[in-house]
Every structure is written in structure tokens, then in C-alpha cells.
Image: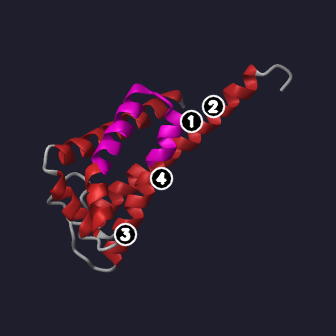
Amino acid sequence: MRRLFLILRLLLAAVFLYAAYTKLRQPWLLFAMSIDAYQLLPEWAVLTLGRTIPWLELALGLLLAAGIAVRYTAAAATVLLALFFGIMLQAYIKGMGIDCGCFGLGEKISPLTLTRDGVFLAMAIVLAIGNSKSTAQVSTAAVPGV
């Protein structure tokens, strides 16, 4: 199980680092335009998220790669990926035909992107739950009399 968690952690780290890289190498306003295409947020929120999400993805990727606070980092990754997945699914169901914004510009929301992001979400869930259980087992094993 430890190998599985290591592989999941490193794969998710690579995904977040690549997502951050593709967004940070372009002007932040391009990513903000991708966010705006979903038509869910006011302009101030779109601009704020356009500037901050790539840095959040970079931080999550670095923390996962380094194995720092994996339990909390995996939980944060799960929440972020669930949010992204839900918003993409809603846009796809509405037939919006927009770029997902996942890895920069030029990738329309499709069954393939939804499947890929669903797999990423499942990986994050497994890592978060598995890490939480293994941490709980270690914690109880370390307490005498428990």
C-alpha cells in the first residue's frame, strides 16, 4: 500500500506542477478568460482566481512531491479537483463547448477531459483517505494501551 500511495502522490504532484507550469508561462489574463468562459463568477473573482489558482496548484504540487503534510495536501487537492470536476461537468451538460482551462488554452471540455479529470479526482480521494487511515493507525499504535 505504501508504494501505491507513493505512486499516487507523485503522479498527482506531476499533474499539479504541469498544470501550474502551463498557466504560469502565459499571461495570467489568458487563464482568467478561461475561468470567465464558465460564466459563474463576477469579474473581480475571475481576476483573483486567474492570478491565484496557478500558484495554488504549484504549492500543492511541490508539497505532494516533497511529501510534506500529505494528509492535508491530499485533502486540499481532493477539494480543488472535485470543484474543478463539478464545474466542468456542469459546463459540459449545458453544452457550453468551452476550453476547460486545465492545462492552459486549447483543450475543449469533452468526455475525454472529464474522464481524465475524474481519474485525477479518484486518485486524490484514494490518497487522502488512505493517508488518513494510515496516519490514524500509526497514531493509535504509538499510544500505549490503545
Name the spot of residue 131 as percent of width and height, x first.
Answer: 56, 36
Return the mark for residue 135: 2
Which residue is the site of mark 4?
79
Circle 4 or circle 3, nearest the eye: 4
Q: Earlier in the sequence, mark 4 or mark 3?
A: 4
Name the spot of residue 125 as percent of width and height, x first.
Answer: 51, 48
Return the mark for residue 131: 1
Q: Which residues are magenta?
A: 52-77
Name the spot of residue 5 as percent of width and height, x first.
Answer: 49, 33
Name the spot of residue 77 as percent of width and height, x first.
Answer: 44, 46
Q: Quadrant of the C terminus?
A: top right
Asked if residue 87 lies in the magenta stretch, the reply is no
Q: Amino acid at mark 3?
A: Leu
Q: Residue most toward the right?
A: 145
Circle 4 or circle 1, nearest the eye: 4
Q: Amino acid at mark 1?
A: Asn
Q: Which SS class for mark 4? A: helix
Q: Which residue corresponds to the image point at 37% horizontal and 69% vertical from the top-left?
A: 89
Relative to 40, residue 138 above or below = above
Query: How was the colour assigned to the protein in this rendering?
Result: secondary structure
Asked if residue 71 lies in the magenta stretch, the reply is yes
Circle 2 or circle 4, nearest the eye: 4
Answer few, some or many: residues within 10 Å of disc 3's Cα (few below 14, many 20 plus, some between 14 and 19). Answer: some
Q: How far apart in space, not on screen, are marks 4 and 1 (Cα)?
A: 15 Å
Q: How far apart in space, not on screen, are marks 4 and 3 (Cα)?
A: 15 Å
Which residue is the site of mark 3?
89
